[in-house]
Image: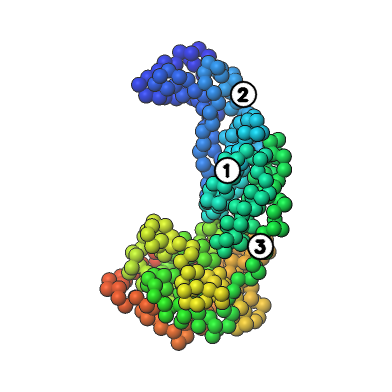
Amino acid sequence: MTDKEVRAAEKRPKAYRLADGQGLHLQVEPNGSKLWRYRYEVPTPTGRKEKMLALGRYPAVGLRAARDARDAARRMLADGKDPGVEKRVARAVETHAAAATFEEFGRAWYEREAAHWVPLHRTYALASLENDVFPAIGKLPINRITPPMVLELLRKVEARGAVSIAHRVRQRISAIFVFAIAAGVGENDPAAVVAKALRKKPNGRQPAATSLAEAQGVLRAVEAQGAQAVTFLAHRFLALTAVRHNEMTRMDWAELEGLDGPEPFWRIPKERMKGEQDDRHEHLVPLSRQAVEILAAVARVNGRRGKVFRHAWKPAEGMSKDTIGKLLAKSGQGGKHVPHGWRSAFSTIMNERHPNRHDREVIDLMLAHRHGNKVEAAYNRAAYMPRRRELAQDWADLLLNGMPGTEGVPGIQAISQPPRPALAGAASAGCGAAHASRQ
């Protein structure tokens, strides 16, 4: 573009854009206003996200100045920074320190950090700020917030019984204060001094039934309670697969392969796995015969699209993260066994049953525990798959020995819709085997 072309751009009934290059364009509004905009992309855990940065109005900002601003934004991107976030931080810094609010910096900090987090962590982190922090101190000038104010809001989190969450919220508050200090606005970190005033976090080891008799007792106690059939099935599936609870509640039918063949499995996308963004890989879960029976029963209730274990009131979403925990608590198992406890149960019982070093390594792989470098881990996932499948079936036979089959789970017999011969949307056994070879 040239200055002459910018001056000559006339208004039209609808807004339109004139491109200059490298993401810069002039947006001409129906009222004749001319606005400089820079289109750019930032990486996310699942791909890339397009964003737009306002660079000012013409003629106050001329063509050369707009290009300079675009080039500055490009340099920020090259340094791994989001120019939109940097602009908001700069604006907050320009505001007098006495007027800069905690929420302003909190949201700027979140935008900067969230680009490196998995979607689930982004959701939880923002929810904790919006529910527990911003209502209490968000509108206050950041330099007027005191340790007692921070402690008061954290005490409310503790009062819900969420002691560990209170510690995580304090860490986020502290990170926001450090962020503001680094920007030249904040003066101190009042969240740092309240750390030792919080109740101690519970022991990191979560309660679990770690003998076969105890594990079967948990299943019997749970299935003696009143609940929806799918909730019972979800609990059984969690016990059989020993995956992390949040991985199961967000499972989609599209992730299940080979269900009508001899090698059924569930492919969990790497974005949902635990660990640093650059250190995660997809996890393959070989499914026992009993696990496939559970999926067939769930399909008769909910169909075979979207989430397998659905939210009770929001069918498009996965089952609430609290559902299985509440079921265990209702059955009297709350202080003895939690959803995560099935991982400990599987690990302890199967390691005692298969004490040789090779099987211990396989069991670790089944739990998605990471050992060695990426190449070694990828090799082991592929080489150990046959044994992983054998151990998955051994665990299912062991755990459900003497237990009623899927049709004996409470509420299943009341479901009148007959099962279909194959699970629609699931890949054939041949396709499943082909995918499995990549593991």
Q: Are marks 1 and 3 in contact (CB under 8 Å)?
A: no
Percent x, y of residue 371: 66, 65
Count residues near mark 2 (Cα–Cα under 10 Å), then give few for <14, some for 14-19, many for 20+.
Answer: few
Q: Position of residue 285 (x, y in %)?
A: 51, 68
Q: Is residue 382 left or right of residue 330?
A: right
Mark 2 or mark 3, whichever is nearer to me: 3
Q: Which residue does the numbered mark 2 point to in the structure image?
A: 68
**Residue 205 appearing in the image:** yes
In the picture, the disc for residue 286 is none
Query: Are the two marked residues, 2 and 3, in contact with CB atoms closer than 8 angstroms?
Result: no
Q: Specify the amino acid type for callout 3.
A: Arg
**Local SS, label 1:** helix
Q: Amino acid at mark 2?
A: Asp
User: Which residue is painted at 58% across and 23% down in the image?
Assistant: 67
Q: Earlier in the sequence, mark 1 or mark 3?
A: 1
Can you tell which quarter of the image residue 91 is in? Answer: top right
> Badge 3 is on which residue?
199
Q: Residue at x 34, y 75 (%)?
A: 411
Q: Nearer the viewer, residue 144 or 45?
A: 144
Is residue 394 among the parts visible in the rendering? no
Quickly name the residue at label 1. Answer: 138
Q: Where residue 304 sits in the image (x, y, percent)?
A: 36, 63
Residue at 49% in and 16% down: 6
Label 1 crowd (10 A; few <14 / some 14-19 / many >=20): many
User: Looking at the image, which residue is at 54% across and 38% down?
Assistant: 41
Percent across and percent down for residue 151 are: 65, 53
**Other residues around mark 3 within 10 Å, as few (<14) / some (14–19) / many (≥20):** few
Secondary structure, mark 2, is helix
